[in-house]
Image: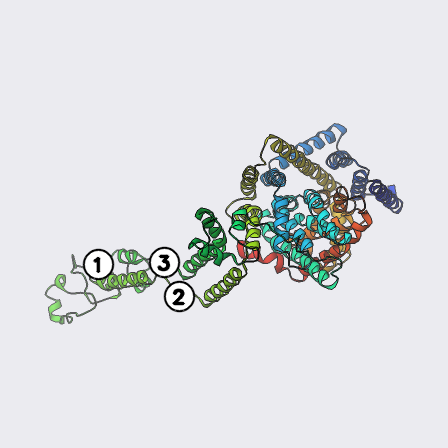
Amino acid sequence: MKLRKELWFGFTLMAIIIAAAMGMVVSVDTMTNGHYGLLMLSLVVVAIMLGFPTAFTLMGMGMLFAFFAYHSGGQTTGGAMKQTLDLMVQRAFAVMSNDVLISIPLFVFMGYLVERANLIEKLFRSLHLALARVPGSLAVATLVTCAVFATATGIVGAVVTLMGLLALPQMLRGGYDVRVSAGAITAGGCLGILIPPSVLLIVYGATAGVSVVQLYAGAFFPGIMLAGLYILYVIILAKIKPALMPPLTAAQRFVPLPKPLQSAGASGEGRALPWLLGALKGKRNQAVSTGFLLKQLIIALLPLILFAAVSLWSYQTVTRVAPADDFSELQQMGAGSATESEGTGGLQPPPSEEGSGLQEPPSSGGLQEPPAAAADSASGAALETPPATASDAASPVATPPAAATATAAAAGDAASTTKPAPQGYWIGLAVGAVAMLAYYSLLSFNRLEVFKMLLSSFFPLLVLIIAVLGSIVFGLATPTEAAAVGALGGFLLAGAYRQLNFTVVKESVFLTAKTSAMVCWLFVGSAIFSAAFALLGGQELVENWVLGMNLTKTQFLVLSQVIIFVLGWPLEWTEIIVIFMPIFIPLLDNFGVDPLFFGLLVALNLQTAFLSPPVAMAAFYLKGVAPKHVTLNQIFAGMLPFMGIQVIAIILLYQFPAIGLWLPQVLYK
């Protein structure tokens, strides 16, 4: 902590030097209100690095400079004070009435409940055994556990701290290099910044006016990509330098079998499915009850049952034909053919001829009587059969053929409510069947026990994640409603694992209130600060300065990301989002940058800032729970390769924007 204080002092001194240099370059006589806005921005950064509370620093600076802006604009002292107080009340009320922010305490509450249900310990153990044969299995299991747990919580400090307590001692006992172990834990713990349900994305969405639903959909594949790059790096490093990550010994991979199976003679490497079927036939059930065997068999067959259910549902989906709308009754009621509509211009009264009176309906257009001679027409026009016209289609006689056609079409539709399954379905079914055969041919009792451990640790979290994120991404619920479902799910999980008691609930509620109050007061302070910055003309000054540089889109993105990366050293992500995003967001339209895409780049970039020395917050989280012989320099050295991977991920996202934009475009456009 002493080193951290020295770093804070260094950054504070640097900020003071920058502010002094700006004061020397721009003399007091030539300073405009825009320059005072930049001075306010510098003073806020200095005050935060000196340790003042961020939210109240923003509010205090905002009100002070807003008063200065109103007073320099010609207002009296009383008028400027009244307008400043009105501004504070209006901004605070605008934050309080933002419905999106309700999801923050609910997601945070879900995360703290899941954290206290001790699921992460069981999850790490089961994944560790499931990936025992993978090179660098402990590091890979750590990264997968961090990714899953980050999805369930989104709290960086909690994930890094818990994995430092659980995974780091096991990795060190297994002979893993300290730097690799520390890098895997800190990098995996920071995935919660990007992977939904991320609180950062909620805060960015509320600040930039971007849909949180689309941000969650857009961050899904970049998060998976980044976690996949981490895992790929660890596996390749373990292959190239196995001394850094030795493989697990047989004792570390050992999984004890239940006593009934041991008494019946089952071996850990024996094939589970044939043995259980043989035992049910009566060959080995003298020492094991039939109910126990049936329970084991059902657990073993769960993947096959799930595969069959998904295959049947997929078949019904791909072969179903949507029924066509039947308009035959409307056609009979209505109003004739298209020719009649064109000729008459719509529904009109029937034409009447002079002296015609009531006439016989026109013929159907089939067999007709020849037209009468001229002499006969003189005898009485009332009995004359009018010539067939285009309006014949509207006659009652024309109804039977139309009705017959409609009936035949309806019968054809009823007879063909399904269609043949496409070739892709059968290919997928064949691949799945081969995978099932391979799975059951390799299913030993050891692997069955690992699968049972995953059922009790991984799959409950997976169901919770799918329920929360699936309902958001597919439009079944708003983020706030999905967060409420997640909070209820976390409550039920803690109860199911017998960890739900008054102490757990009290601690979770207290930490949730503390975190939510911090975020919401930050929003209030940011709103007041942004208003004062705009009143002073600081935003206009920055915009003119950036546009005067004649940057291209790529140059602007590189410049903005470098600034955010540097700011990530001394500042928390909340401060970067609420203070500096309102400065960057108005510039995006000038360069044709999608705010959704910019938000994904920022989320990736802030992960890099969390791992970049000298002020890497994840390193200090891990150092607080690491053994004494693990130094900060070792943690920093372990984080550097993963920081390079994050830079590669940012470049990939920029070069291939579809990684982040494809899913939102498919679902919402």
Kind of residue at badge 1: Ser
**Circle 1/circle 2 CB separation < 8 Å:** no
Extreme-top residue of the structure: 78
Tell me the tag on residue 420.
2
Given residues 461 and 74, the one toward you in this image is 461
Residue 194 in view here: no
Q: Nearer the viewer, mark 1 or mark 2?
A: 2
Separation of residues labelled 2 and 3 (CA atoms) = 16 Å
Residue under the point 48% across and 59% down: 274
Separation of residues labelled 1 and 3 (CA atoms) = 43 Å
Q: Position of residue 374 (x, y in %)?
A: 14, 71
Kind of residue at badge 2: Pro
Residue under the point 14% across and 64% down: 384
**Circle 2/circle 3 CB separation < 8 Å:** no
Residue under the point 70% across and 32% down: 83
Residue 336 relative to residue 119: left or right: left
Secondary structure beneath dot 1 equals loop
Image quadrant occupied by the C terminus: bottom right
Are there few (<14), some (14-19), or many (20+) residues within 10 Å of tag 2?
few
